[in-house]
Amino acid sequence: MLLSADRPETPAAIRTDLGAIFISLELSKSTWLITALAPGSEKMSRHSVAGGDLAGLFACFSELRRKAQARQGQLYPLVVIQEAGLDGFWIDRVLNQEDWIESHVVDAASIAVSRRHRRAKTDRIDGEALIRTLMAYKRGEPRVCSMVRVPAIEDEDRRRICRERKALVAERISHVNRIVHAEWKRCRVGLDYHIAVDRHHYSVPHRFARREVEVRFTARTVEIFLAGERIAVHMRGSGNGRHTTVAEHMPSSHQRYQGWTPAKIREDAAKVGPMWQALITATLALSGTSNCGTPPKNAKAALCASAQSANCSLHVAQANDRLDPPITATNRCARRVSPVRRSTSTGTVYALRAWPMAHRRNQ
C-alpha cells in the first residue's frame, strides 16, 4: 500500500542567498518579457519592454541591480537565460559583451516538464520555469538542460539561407494548395471571339467562335475550357463592359490593325504635313474618339476648313491610290474633299468623300 509523505505546513521558500541576479527572457516581435529573481527577495518580479528595445532592456537591468544593491549593500552580476528561437543569437552576443552579464541560450526541448497532465503554457509560466532551470544548472545538477553552443556569425549566415529557402518553399506550397471560391458557367463564344462574364468580355482563340465553352472564374482569374481542355486564361476584370483581348487570340487580319490607335493615326498624319494633321485631328474629334476629348462645338466647321486647306495641299497625293480617278498635276485643284454625314445605330459619323469639281456640279 502506497503511503503519501506528510506535506510541510508552509511551502519551501526560494533561496535568497544568491550570488547573482537570475533573469529569463521571453522574446516576441512586439514585447520582451523579463522575469527576475534577485538576492534578498523571495518573489520573482516581471517586467516588459518593447521588442527590439535594447536601451530599455539595459535600463531594466540597471534598475534591478540598483534595487538589489539597496537591499543587500553590494552590486550583483546578472545571469541571463533565453530559449533558442527565430531571433537567432544576436541578443546573446550583445549581452556577453558586458562584463557584469553572463548569458546562456538553452534548448527549449531539453527542459523537463511534468507528464502527469496537460500543462498550461504562458510566458509567465515559461519565465518561472527558465529561472528554476537556470538556478539548477548553476548549482551543477546533472542533466538539467542542454545549453546551445552559439555559432559564429559566418556560420549563422550560412544557416539563414537554408532557413529562408525552407520558409519560401512552405509559402509557395500554401499558395498552391490554398482553397479558393470558384464558380462555373456555360456560355457561347460570340462572332467577335469573346465571352461575357459579369459584364466584362474576355477573348478566346478566334477559331473557337460560336462554340459552347465552360468558364471557371474566381475573384482573381477567369479560365475558359472546351471539352475539358483549357483554351484561355485571363486576370479577372471589373464589370464595366470593357474587353480583355489577347493578341494571339486575334485573326491575322485583326492583328494587322491592332496598333491603329488614334494616337498612332495622328502621328502618321503629322509625318505627311500640317494640313493633313489638322484634317485628321478634326475628323477624330468629330467622331467623338475618347482619346481626343470632347468634340468642340465648331468641330464640323473646323473639319470643313481643314478639308479645304488639305484639298490644295500637295500632301493629299499620299492618298492618291485610294481615289478614282487618281489625282494628277492637272486635276489636283479640281478635286474637292468634304465631310459626309451618316447616321448609324451608334450615332452620327462623319466620313470624307472626294470627287471632281465637274461631278460635284452635276449632282
Image (spheres, rainbow, N blue to C red):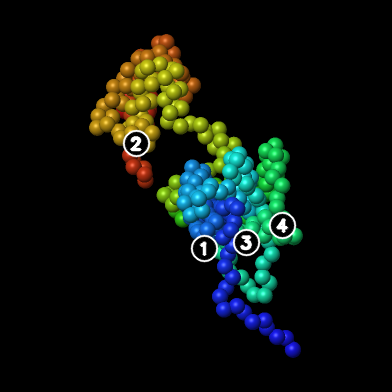
Instruction: Tell me the CA gap for discs 3 and 1.
Output: 13 Å
Q: Where is mark 1, residue-wise?
A: 43
Position in image of residue 197 (x %, y %) = 49, 55
- Which residue is outermost to the top? 329
The residue where tag 3 is placed is 132
Residue 191 picture location, percent across and down: 53, 49
- Indicate whether 96 appears above or below 126: above
Which residue does the image show at 49% across and 21% down from the upper left? 321
Classify mark 1: helix, strand or loop: loop
Query: Which type of secondary structure does the marked residue at label 4 adopt?
Result: loop
Label 1 environment density (alpha carbons within 10 Å; few <14, some 14–19, many ≥20): few
Q: Nearer the viewer, residue 41 or 90?
A: 41
Q: Which mark is drawn over residue 76? A: none
Q: Amino acid at mark 2?
A: Gly
* 4 or 2: mark nearer the eye: 4
Residue 357 or residue 350, whichever sits in front: 350
C-alpha separation, residue under disc 4 versus residue under disc 2: 90 Å
Kind of residue at disc 3: Arg
Q: Is residue 125 above or below residue 63?
A: below
Q: Which numbered marker is on residue 140?
A: 4
Residue labelled with disc 2: 288
Residue drawn at the location 42% of the way across and 10% of the way down: 329
Distance between mark 2 and mark 3 Cα atoms: 83 Å
N-term mark: 2 or 1: 1
Mark 1 or mark 4, which is nearer the start of the sequence? Answer: 1
Nearer the N terminus, badge 3 or badge 1?
1
Most extreme residue toward the front, as rendered?
A: 73
